[in-house]
Image (cartoon, coloured by chain):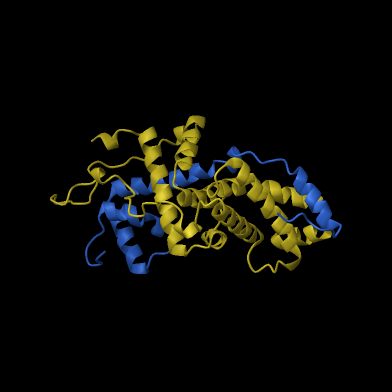
Chain colours: A yellow, B blue
Amino acid sequence: MNSDEETLAALQRGDEQVFVELVQQHQALMLRVASRYVRNRTVAEEVVQETWLGVLNGLATFEGRASLKTWIFRILTNRAITRAQREGRAVPFSSLGDDGDDEPAVDPDRFRPESDRWAGGWKSFPHPLPEDRLLERETLAMIAAAIAELPARQHTVIVMRDVEGWSAEEVCASLAISEANQRVLLHRARSKVRSCLESYLDPSPALT
Amino acid sequence: MSTDRALTCQELTEALTDYLEGVMAPEERARFDAHLALCEGCVHYVTQMRQTVEAVHRLRVSDVEATAPDDLLAAFRAWRRGGPIPEA
């Protein structure tokens, strides 16, 4: 993909191809993010649509202080929140949902108890996951399902970071959250997906 | 977390994201590395987490199909002509 500057210049020239590419590049994730705020798929699609119109309206005045995609997602989350509020539903991202931020990364039963000389040590060691099975279609489907079940904020952050490959800074800027907050959400999300993967691919340690 | 004793395995699992994100203070990082040097279980745990991140990266967001941008194209053309964009 082009740099932001090239993309912007092309859009301002009226290059339709570049606009279509930009839409295709971000549409799926935008729908996902919007879906986390509003009631249903149709409304989420409308929010995404409104966002693109907002982008077109703002192009002339876009200053390039944020990256293009960060700016687009800020518009998206603002629209989604406005829409959700109109529906009487929600709330800014920072207070969205029940993330259970004190949930442990690993089931405490996997560790030796306080009374033990090696308190907090593994009862039985984890094993590396079998690489060949990680590549199987069923495994990927299981991962997708595990991600789908995450609370809203954890879901959004792991999709942006680990599916889309965004930087921490981009995620923070797009969702207006702090670096520390972003990290906690990522930590909970990755820990849960790891736990699902482990019990799916290597159920033995959890049984001891 | 006190800094004068070794990290437990359980504490390591909670600190792992800070470690992978490179935001740990040097002394914390040293404690983390010292634990890893002695604990095969935690080395495997870190491996599992790296494998998890790599596996997640193989997913495509296009599990959610993109909608056809027909009306967006119309909006883009209107914008290009300098006409009004139907603002929602």
> Who's the residue at 46% across and 34% down the image?
A142
Question: Residue drawn 37% across and 68% down?
Answer: B25
**Which residue is depicted at the point 14% across and 49% down?**
A116
Residue A206: x and y in percent read 28, 37
- Left or right of A38 in this view: A102: left
Q: Where does residue B86 sit, x and y in percent of width and height?
A: 77, 54
Camera-side residue: B42 or A175?
Answer: A175
* Residue A124 quadrant: top left
Q: Determine whether, in the image, residue A121 is placed left or right of residue A72.
A: left
Q: Nearer the viewer, residue A79 or A122?
A: A79
Q: Position of residue A80 (x, y in %)?
A: 58, 53
Name the residue: 58% across, 43% down.
Answer: B61
Q: Residue A73: x, y in percent?
A: 61, 56
* Residue A22 appearing in the image: yes
Residue A15 visible here: no
Q: Which of A76 and A130 is in front in this view?
A: A76
Image quadrant holding the C terminus of chain A, namely: top left
Marks counted in the figure total 0
Farthest right residue in view: B81
Side (left or right) of B36 relative to B86: left
Q: In this view, does A26 lie to the left or right of A135?
A: right
Q: Where A141 falls versus A7 (above or below)?
A: above
